[in-house]
Image: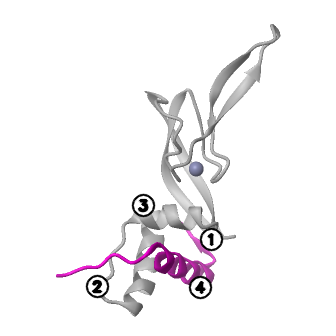
Amino acid sequence: MSYKLPSDEEVADAVRMAISRRGVVNSQRRLAELVLKELKSTDPDFSVTEERVRRIAIDRGIVKVNIIARDSEKKTASNECPVCGVKMKRIRNLTVYGGSINLGYRCSRCGYWTGLTNRRPIRYIFSKK
Ligand SMILES: [Zn+2]
């Protein structure tokens, strides 16, 4: 079977259609299925990954995302947001000595946050913005 990759704009349009029909979509897999259905109505050969749908939906500001995450034992290794890919800001706490300590990171775009041990996203709930 042949497949084609839709443009970011085509994916974004399909996300807009899917989310305005449903209002709330309670998993990333479900959102990707709905988006793919929209895309296939334009071209049956279109294919898209769940992650690409998530990133475009957040990047274009089409959806509000509610992230359910679980604590892991691993140290947070990077300040890149695992949900949407932007650089996250440090969460700092001022100390009584005038310095500050790093408590973790927060993403200003999608709202994901983590402490110094990693919170792993396990589920996403998307709603219309
Ligand atoms: Zn993010």
* Mark 2 residue crowding within 10 angstroms, few (<14) / some (14–19) / many (20+): some
At 63% from the left and 77% from the top, the residue drawn is 23
Q: Which residue is mark 4?
A: 21
Q: Earlier in the sequence, mark 4 or mark 1?
A: 4
Residue matched to label 1: 62
Q: Is residue 27 visible?
A: no
Cα–Cα gap, marks 4 and 3: 21 Å
How many residues crowd around disc 4 within 10 Å: few (fewer than 14), some, or many (20 or more)? Answer: few
Q: Give the numbered dot on residue 51.
A: 3
- Tell how many labels: 4
Nearest to viewer (mark 4 / mark 3): 3
Secondary structure found at label 2:
loop
Identified at 63% across, 45% down, the residue is: 107
Hey, which quadrant is residue 41 in on the image? Answer: bottom left
- Mark 1: give few (<14), some (14-19) or many (20+) Cα within 10 Å: some
Amino acid type of the residue tagged 3 in the rendering = Glu
Comparing labels 4 and 1, the label whose residue is closer to the camera: 1
Q: Position of residue 49 (x, y in %)?
A: 36, 66
Q: Which residue is mark 2?
A: 45
Closer to the observer: label 4 or label 2?
2
Q: Quadrant of residue 16?
A: bottom right
- Circles 1, 3 touching at the beta carbon (< 8 Å): no
Applied colour scheme: one colour
Which mark sits nearer the N-terminus, 4 or 3? 4
Magenta stretch contains residue 126: no
27 or 92, nearer to the observer? 92
Q: Position of residue 69 (x, y in %)?
A: 53, 45
> In the rendered structure, which segment of residues is drawn in magenta?
1-27
Q: Alpha-carbon distance for marks 4 and 1? A: 13 Å
Local SS, label 4 = helix
Picture layout, residue 84 above or below residue 64: above
Q: For residue 18: magenta?
A: yes
